[in-house]
Image (cartoon, rainbow, N blue to C red):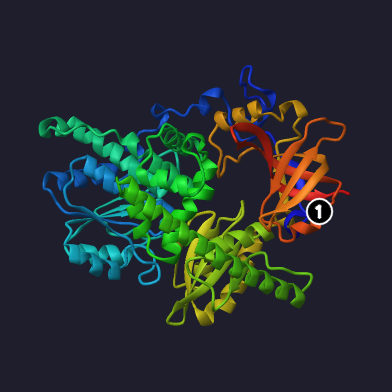
Amino acid sequence: MYYHGVKKVIEIRPMINKRAEFGEMHPMLARILRSRGIRSQEELERTLAKLPSPWLLSGMEEMVAHLITALEQRQKITVIADFDADGATSCAVAMKGLQMMGAGGVSFVVPNRFEYGYGLTPEIVELVKQQQPDVLITVDNGISSLDGVKAAKEAGMTVLVTDHHLPGPELPAADAIVNPNLPEDRFPSKVLAGVGVIFYILMALRSRLRDKKWFAQRGLQEPNLAQLLDYVALGTVADVVELDAVNRILVHQGLLRIRMGRGHPGINALIEVAGRRAETLLAADLGFALGPRINAAGRLDDMSLGIQCLLTDDPTLAKELALQLDDLNSGRKEIEGQMKHEAMQLLNEMRVLDENHLAAGVCLYDANWHQGVIGILASRIKDRLHRPVIAFAPAGKDLIKGSARSIPGVHIRDVLSDIAAAHPKLLSKFGGHAMAAGLTLCMHDYPPFALAFDEMVRKRLHEVDLEQKVLSDGELSEQDMTVAFAELLQQSATWGQGFPEPVFHGVFEVVQSTVVGQRHLKLVLRIPAGSLLIDAIAFFIDHPEQWLGIRSCLAAYKLDINEFRGQRSIQFIVQYLEKIA
């Protein structure tokens, strides 16, 4: 019997930098850091002074020059946002940041995914014309908006593109583009989220305005851009970009502000409705508690609601908006649950048709699926199958939209690019990055596309890549199963995508097992011949009652701290569970 019904292999995570020296650091922590490629104690520093210069980003000079012109001439600026958490936080950073610089008329437009689709399209330009802006700034989109940028330029607007998605073979004819993934860009981090890109632009803009004595001459207080880092942290983690050295700094500094009570009212309200505490908030909470509530607005309704929650300075209004987002997220969970059930039925039918074969790249479609939830569905099925997955839903006019999620080693946007090159008429449009992408197809092209997707993924994979593994940092001794060691892990680094939180494993006696909340399994574990009783919880088990009465198990787990009535104790968050007896 296995957690989620899938047999996995536990492997010890290899050490990348075996010779890295960390002084008198706890030996297990030192091993964890070596296995994540850290070479020295200095790489763990997370001060803002360690951030690379914004001027390393190509296009920054042109971008800042146009923004200064807009400020000096009091031009009207419209921000074109995206309908996910990165797009919403990017919009909040742009709006707040430009206003802090002294900009007057700044507004935003976020496309409704069900009416307009993604990015700056000609239809969005027509909508924006009603505001009569002089300048358009895209955040977290625009690098593939060739027609939209052209339409905006023809309408007489200055167009500034800020994005982090991979560019296609042709760039839009914007007045300035800042994107760390542009060819020959010298910025050391290629994994900035959209919110990180606009934050860097504001840093460069403030620097140039300071040199021009802009703030002093106008009696303006020079803005402290660190005030925006709670937004940056949320958008970065929610977009599941790799937490490289730059992103770890940005996320850490944003978390520090939140923990010190300096978060924006909207962020604080989201923390409250999610049942978290600001003082102890972790990066994982941004990804699993706050991000989904912001994303729910764009998935089911209108992301304007999420952006308004982030932008408001009124705590009462922030709480009202956060509660609305919480309700939307609950609705999203119900829809997702039904879609996941239907997806598993489809997969079972595939296995019935061919018991010895499951596609290396899996495509799933149902005419009743919700367009706003297919990204989450693809992610859930990808985790279950350990294969790249695309989930499709109807998009009207004989079109279907797909949301793709991948596994390490398969760059999903490159897969789509290869399909487009081999089958020029198959893909209407696509975009994305290594682990996630979106695309649009004609309904009648779905069968040949599914075959092409499987073929292109299979070329990149070997059988060993499809083996389900749990990478462990080793077995913990009973002496290290303490609140102090759990705190040390939390405080030593900012864990997340590409810099994974430590996972340990071991064989345990099961002292007690109970089902909680219908789908969760609560356990009390003990190391064989040990004395410490450890609480553990495994979330979202399909048939948790089947685990009742087991006597021993193999478990892979994260070390967590449980707080209850002022008492703090360790708790295992189970990642994998295998029955032994």
Question: Label 1: which residue?
Answer: 548
Tell me how many marks there are: 1
Q: Position of residue 405 (x, y in %)?
A: 56, 59
Residue 475 falls left or right of residue 46:
right
Q: Secondary structure at mark 1?
A: loop
Residue type marked 1: Leu
In the image shown, does 221 or 18 lie closer to the viewer? 221
Does residue 414 appear left or right of residue 9 in this picture? left
Q: Residue 505 at x, y = what percent?
A: 75, 40
Asked if residue 141 can be seen in this view, the reply is no
Q: Residue at 41% x, 58% y: name it.
A: 324
Would you place residue 163 above or below residue 423 in this image?
A: above
Query: Which residue is pictured at 63% across the width and 72% down the height?
Result: 342
Determine the image quadrant of residue 134.
Answer: bottom left
Residue beneath the point at 59% across and 78% down: 447
Callout 1: few (<14), some (14-19), or many (20+) C-alpha neighbours within 10 Å? some
Q: Is residue 486 above or below residue 445?
A: above
Residue situated in front as seen by the camera: 580 or 357: 580
Quadrant housing the N terminus: bottom right
Query: Residue 434, percent across and down?
Result: 53, 54
Q: Confirm whether residue 500 shows in the render.
A: yes
Quarter where residue 172 is shown? bottom left
Quick one: which residue is furthest to the front in this view? 565
Q: Is residue 195 toward the left or the right of residue 209 in the image?
A: right
- Residue 167 x %, y %: 41, 56
Q: Nearer the viewer, residue 168 or 121?
A: 121
Q: Is residue 385 above or below residue 188?
A: below
